[in-house]
Image (cartoon, rainbow, N blue to C red):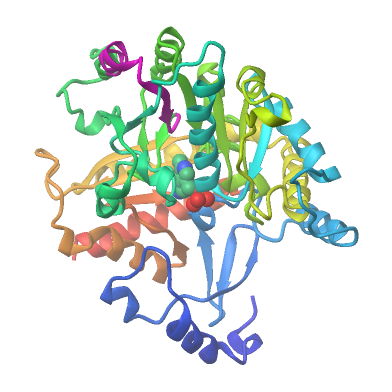
Amino acid sequence: MTSSGDFPQADRLTQIDHAHLWHPFTQMQEWVGEPPLVIAEGDGVMVRDTEGRWYLDAVSSLWVNVHGHRKREIDEAIIAQLGKIAHSTLLGCASPPAILLAERLVALAPPGLTKVFYSDDGSTAVEVALKMALQYWQQVTPARPKKTKVLAFSLAYHGDTVGAVSVGGIDVFHARFGPYLFPTHKAKPPYCYRCHLGLAFPSCETACAREIEATLDAHHDEIAALIVEPSVYAAAGMITAPPGYLRRLRELCTRHDVLLIADEVATGFGRTGAMFACEREGVTPDLMTVAKGLTGGYLPLAATLTTQAVYDAFLGEYADFRTFFHGHSYTGNALACAAALANLDVFVHERVIEGLAAKIAHLQKALAPLADHPKVGDVRQCGLMVGIELVQDRATKARFPVADRIGWKISREARSLGLLTRPLGDVLVLVPPLASTNHDLSAMATILHRAIETVLDR
Ligand code: PMP
């Protein structure tokens, strides 16, 4: 490991950052007043700041990195593509990497998803899915023009563009825009630790799904689509859904003629232990969004996959204007598609999915001692996605006062111990790169445990 001597302009970088960078999600005075962490380099699961300090990237640079930083195969694929062309438009044209990637995605996706529409990030992939679903019902034969609403979950997060915000439900992110959003039906998600029905799984027999059934029974005539984060409501605090829940949603949507949109932006590409969370329940959604891990965490690229049946509703004569009028300038960017192809190659060559079960079990074991801490209410894990919910009182599950900033303080402490994580309120988060070794995973659990003790037991 080298020293900060490699970065003669380190101080200047910090000043520039302070003066001109508007950080996403960090407008609080407390954060603005601090010197920012400036990451200059990465290697495997580690990143290094401009002061020369190394950290475990325990949230995969916001859930995007897959095989580690500076993965040789992905670096080389991007360089090779640069030698050909960086970008050409996909509007009316195509490029070899975009064509090949679509083929690869279809081969990997749940059976029946055979069409790939590219966009740039998770939010836009969700916008595309919503617009496709809404337009589909206007154009299918026979048309169902009354189907104009989306059923979404009250703790969902699908991105920050206005359509994605409309189907989100996390008040702290979304409430401000309430009056400007399109109307939706909202359902309560299965948050088993704080079950709104006061029941316990499995004896509840997933009673919360019956509420969805009731909503669909009553309103299916006007509901175009149901959008769900399969297996894990990620941004709400890594809230895991009980087994069988997604399959039940699929059955209900099929029965009520409602399109199922699975937002795999966070869960896709191995995070839950399967390539896609939908696979865990043998579900094929009508539309599926992918982004974050698609390029291995290298470049922004997203895709919305759908079925031939949805695609067919958009085919028509020139003058019919049944086209899906949506396309971004950088859609299907060749460099990003080349990175994504190399990412998928690494999955195959290193048998990444096959190796996950052992890592997931190891992480679970490494996290077990945390559950004994009196302020740890719930340790939730789905694959390599972990949420540790801290509570002031375990018996009542009472939350800490917001002003205590417990999650933030523990994350800061973990940072001083060499681990980067970003809490979701008072839920501590671990989303390690899939490339993490058992040794890395143990280190992450140990540091987090020590940080919890340092902040909460002092
Ligand atoms: N959907 C889900 C489930 C997400 O977790 C996120 C981002 N955390 C998004 C969509 C939005 O993705 P992006 O940040 O790439 O726009």
Q: Residue furthest right?
A: 84
Residue at image position (78%, 31%) is: 103
Q: Residue furthest left?
A: 396
- 131 or 228: nearer the eye? 131
Whole-percent x, y for residue 97 in the image:
81, 45
Reply above or below: 255 against 278. above
Does residue 431 appear in the picture of this structure? no
Does residue 352 appear in the picture of this structure? yes
Query: Along the horizontal axis of the image, is 369 left or right of 347?
Result: left
Reply above or below: 13 against 104. below
- 301 or 369: nearer the eye? 301
Q: What is the span of residues highlighted in magenta in the rendered image?
A: 212-230
Q: Quadrant of the N terminus?
A: bottom right
- 237 or 188: nearer the eye? 188
Magenta stretch: residue 218 in it?
yes
Query: Along the horizontal axis of the image, is 124 left or right of 309?
Result: left
Res 104 → quadrant: top right
Q: How many circles with numbers are drawn on the protein? A: 0
Query: Along the horizontal axis of the image, is 201 left or right of 62?
Result: left
Residue at image position (19%, 61%) is: 457
Whole-percent x, y for residue 237 in the image:
33, 44
Magenta stretch: residue 278 in it?
no
Res 417 → quadrant: bottom left
Q: Quadrant of the C terminus?
A: bottom left
